[in-house]
Image (cartoon, rainbow, N blue to C red):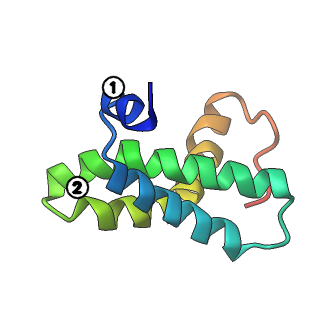
Amino acid sequence: MDVKEVLDALRIDPAILTAGFAGGIVAALRDLALKAIEQVAIVISGTFIGVYVGEPIAVMTHMPPILLAFVIGYSGNEGLSLFYRKVILPRLGGIGGTNAAP
């Protein structure tokens, strides 16, 4: 099984995957003070956020999916972090404190 077959089985467009990956790379390079493992995690999550969130939003808004995959791959980690701090932590009773670092 090659990469194309895997992507086809997961219904992932390689161009959108590449755009999300590029957005994740740019997001990781934005803060070079991060540890290497944190930068790798940002790239991986940016890639998959761009693919799985960017494409459906592009379909709903009739915007170019590659552009949205890049933008969401770049900014998706910040959105997830904000969602976690503002929605998830308060529902868990403030585990980790409400004054968590941004």
Inter-mark Cα distance, 1 to 2: 21 Å
> Residue placed at 66% from the left, 54% from the top?
42
Q: Nearer the viewer, residue 14 or 66?
A: 14
Element assignment for label 2: helix
Height in image: 3 above or below 35?
above
Q: Residues within 10 Å of mark 2 (few under 14, many from 20)?
A: some
Element assignment for label 1: helix
Residue type at mark 2? Ala
> Residue placed at 49% from the left, 44% from the top?
48
Sequence-wise, which precedes: disc 1 or disc 2? 1
Q: Nearer the viewer, residue 60 or 18?
A: 18
Height in image: 5 above or below 36?
above
Q: Residues within 10 Å of mark 1 (few under 14, many from 20)?
A: few
Residue type at mark 1? Ala
Residue under pointer 2: 58
Height in image: 17 above or below 11?
below
The numbered dot on residue 85 is none
Residue under pointer 1: 9
Q: Left or right: where does residue 93 sit relative to residue 46?
A: right
**Residue 28 location (% of width, % of height):** 68, 65
Residue at the left extreme? 62
**Residue 96 location (% of width, % of height):** 82, 39
> Residue placed at 86% from the left, 59% from the top?
35
